[in-house]
Amino acid sequence: MLECRDNIEHKIIWQPRMGSSLFWFVNWTGLGALYFITPQDFYCDEVIHNVYDVVEEGEWDEDMLMDILTHDLTLHIIENIKPPVMHDELDRPYWMLEARGKFTVKYAWEYTRRRRDPRIAFKNIWVKGLHFKTAFFTWKVWKARLPLDDHFRRWGYFMPSRCWCYRNPDEETLAHVFYRSYATHTIWYYFLSNAGISMEGISLQHAVTKCWIVQVVPRLKPIFYVPPSIIL
């Protein structure tokens, strides 16, 4: 149920009434939560908590919106969304997959079933003979379920920690810890280069996938499913 929530929460749009919706972390614009669609070079001003914080005398504070959002996002809000009116009615959630706007398990199931991850990925992770804890850890890396800085950032928490596994410490993200840092990159390169797999210009998930789809004789195929889990 929690995994489904991550997939379908952005299908709930909050219709401004008094502007009580969280400005950054819920979908009140129809485009998704602003925190996730704003470019990284734009600073997330945490002083602004709710939608009514960018309203002045019943109108959008255009200067403030221009300062914290891109030009396109600002125009979308000004041209398509009516400014909230300060009264006692809280903002309302509207389920966009149903005409009446009411959440139903039926429509949530239909939506998540179409968006489900390809079964082939999980089939390759759960390799017969591989220790359960090892395979389970690989699944958590694949689904980005580890408590690292980039995971917490999606929930609105900015962590001050740094990964010190290399002489140039960097933010402790999934890609850095398991792929880009000197130690992990060296290990990946050792195994993949000996298997004839190039690492040039590929991401962590691409490296894992290349091990799964490498062209080898059938009797060696199961062996190539295991290295990603062992390396991780």
Image (cartoon, rainbow, N blue to C red):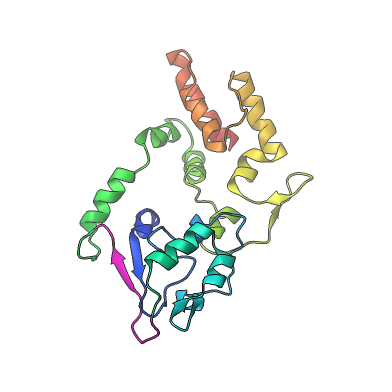
The quadrant in which residue 148 appears is bottom right
Of the pair 134 and 207, the residue shown nearer to us:
207
> Residue 121: image x %, image y %?
41, 35
108 or 146, which is in the foreground? Answer: 108
Residue ranking furthest to the bottom: 88
Instruction: Report the quarter where the C terminus lies.
Output: top right
Q: How many marks?
A: 0
Identify the residue at horizontal 53%, vertical 57% (top origin).
38
Residue closest to the eye, 196 or 232: 196
Query: Residue 141: where, in percent of width, then height?
Result: 52, 44
Res. 210 in view? yes
For the question of whether residue 148 can be seen, the reply is no
- Looking at the image, residue 25 lies above or below residue 219: below
Q: Is residue 168 left or right of residue 208?
A: right
Is residue 131 in the magenta section? no
The range drawn in magenta is 85-97
81 or 6, nearer to the observer: 81
Horizontal and vertical percent for residue 62?
52, 71
Taken as a whole, is the magenta stretch helix, strand or loop?
loop
Q: Residue furthest right?
A: 167
Position of residue 229 relative to residue 37, above or below, is above
Q: Is residue 223 left or right of residue 12?
A: right
Residue 87 sits inside the magenta stretch: yes
Name the spot of residue 201 as percent of width and height, x first.
Answer: 61, 31
Image quadrant containing the N terminus = bottom left
Q: Residue at x 65, y 51 (%)?
A: 172
Name the image quarter holding residue 66. bottom right
Question: Eyeballing the image, is 108 above or below 47?
Answer: above
